[in-house]
Amino acid sequence: MCTACLIENVKSHMLSRRSLFSGAAATAAMGVAAGALSARPVLAQAKGRVVDLTHAYDSDFPTFDGKPGILYEVDKNFDPDGYHLFKLTIFEHTGTHIDAPLHFAEGGTSVDALPVENLIAPLCIVDISARAAEDPNAVVEPADIEAWVSANGEIPAGACVAMNSGWTARIGNPAWRNLPDGTLAFPGFSKAATDLLAQTGAASIGVDTLSLDPGNSPDFAVHYSWLPSGRFGIEGLANLEQLPASGATIFIGAPKHRGGTGGPARILAMH
């Protein structure tokens, strides 16, 4: 083959490859654009500030039954092993954690099987902190949901609706869990409110307290209705007061141990 022919052949080959890659890039760009469009309802109002909604916890962190939620055992130490390693014994429902449907429903969805599309969601915060300051067992009522909608618009499908009762300020104080006589006392949701939220298409609810139900609940009515419906809850959220009532996006780092009823989670919000 002559030199000129070889040069022309190479140029033709390069042009073909350039067209191929241009087409691939265009296709990829279309895919990214489609992904961006599908994420837009969730992320449209996010401005980039990240708030940690997770409490750091240890064996002293308050739990529902009063037993330590996590135990540490040294397995390796830097001297003489050259590295550190703990063996952990963890109860699923401790610290900032997920309640999967399986927690209160025979045959319910386990934490590893939660739909991933519900782990990134619009965050709607219902503030009952003024009422909770007067009543430690205050609950989110349907009127609170209706007031939120009136002020902020409809609750988006797939949203996480979180109660801000101001309880983060009590962390480190026994009042986060109970009254001076040891009686459990903390705010939660009313069943009437979560029944209403189920109609909106919300996928999860969250609380800044120990339980989805208030401390004085005699029957765990919210747990026994919300979770068996296939939805999940988040308990022990922190720092909700740092976020607006609407417009933030929540990122739910749910654990993925097979068959789990829930577990400690890292929860972040961006707005």
Image: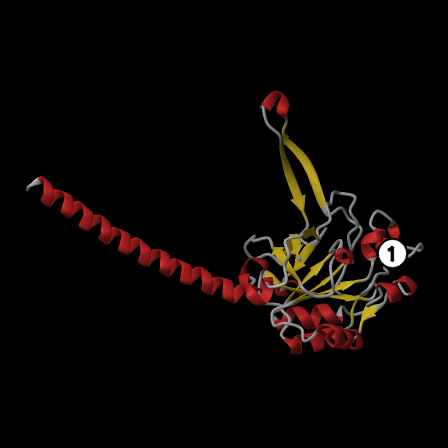
The answer to whether 93 appears left or right of 40 in the picture is right
* Residue at x 78%, y 55% (from the top left corner): 64
How many labels, in total? Answer: 1
**Closer-to-camera residue (62/30):** 30
Mark 1 residue type: Asn
The front one of 217 and 187 is 187
Q: Quadrant of the N terminus?
A: top left
- Identify the image quadrant of the C terminus: bottom right
Residue projecting furthest to the front: 4
Taking the image as shown, residue 257 lies to the left or right of residue 178, namely left
Residue carrying label 1: 178
Residue shown at the point (69%, 52%) measured from the top left = 51
Q: Position of residue 130 (x, y in %)?
A: 88, 65
> Please, which residue is most extreme toward the left here?
1
* Residue 91 seen from this side: yes
- Residue 154's quadrant in the figure? bottom right
What secondary structure is found at the residue carrying circle 1?
loop
- Dot 1: few (<14), some (14–19), or many (≥20) neighbours within 10 Å? some
Looking at the image, which residue is at 55% across and 57% down? Answer: 112
x and y percentages locating residue 189 in the rendered image? 77, 69
Colour pattern:
secondary structure
| Nearest to the observer: residue 217 or residue 155 | 155
Residue 115 visible in the picture: no
Q: Position of residue 211 (x, y in %)?
A: 76, 61
User: Residue 227: x, y in percent?
Assistant: 66, 68
Give above or below for 160 relative to 76.
Answer: below
Residue at image location 23% in from the left, 52% down from the top = 15
